[in-house]
Amino acid sequence: MSYVHTQISKLPLLCIAFLVLSAGSLARAQEQPLVYVRHAEQASYPPLAAVARIEGTVKLKLTITPDGNVRNVETLSNDVTPKTHPLLEQSSIALAKTWTFGCFNCAAGADYQHVVTFI
């Protein structure tokens, strides 16, 4: 038996193994909720912050109702994203509250959470 013939005969086994592993990963991925934005207002930098050259990253944890509206907004900060200027936080919170969301694979009729980062 030649080397080429041996490699060709292994090809179907490799394809089957790949499909089995991919199907397992896909099944686990489909179990996770997928949050998406249905409607987002255009973000604009706060004029006062632009004039004062205030920069920063704002990380928000949103609690979203089953119909997609933002119920609650919490500012997150840690070593990577430290607390930013209140002007940036206020404008980011106000903007996020105008957005509507959808969720694939979320529990029906229950609130869900999503984290948004503004840079």
Image: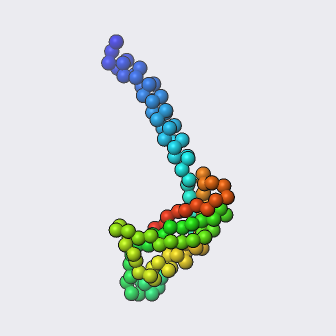
Q: Is residue 42 something that shows in the picture?
A: no
Q: In which quarter of the image is residue 34?
A: bottom right
The location of residue 37, given as percent across then percent down, is 57, 63
The location of residue 110, given as percent across then percent down, is 64, 59
Residue pictured at 42% horizontal, 28% vertical: 14
Quadrant location, the C terminus:
bottom left
Name of the residue lying farthest toward the top:
1
How many numbered circles does the render carry? 0
* Depth check, front residue: 28 or 55: 28
Name of the residue lying farthest toward the left:
3
The location of residue 64, given as percent across then percent down, is 60, 65
Residue pictured at 52% horizontal, 46% vertical: 29
Residue pictured at 54% horizontal, 67% vertical: 62
* Depth check, front residue: 108 or 91: 108
* Depth check, front residue: 65 or 104: 65
Q: In this view, does 90 lie above or below 21?
A: below
Q: Is residue 44 above or below residue 108?
A: below
Q: Is residue 31 left or right of residue 11?
A: right
Q: In this view, does 42 lie to the left or right of 65?
A: left
Residue pictured at 57% horizontal, 66% vertical: 63
The location of residue 84, given as percent across then percent down, is 40, 77
Quadrant location, the N terminus:
top left
Q: Is residue 46 above or below residue 3?
A: below
| Image colouring | rainbow
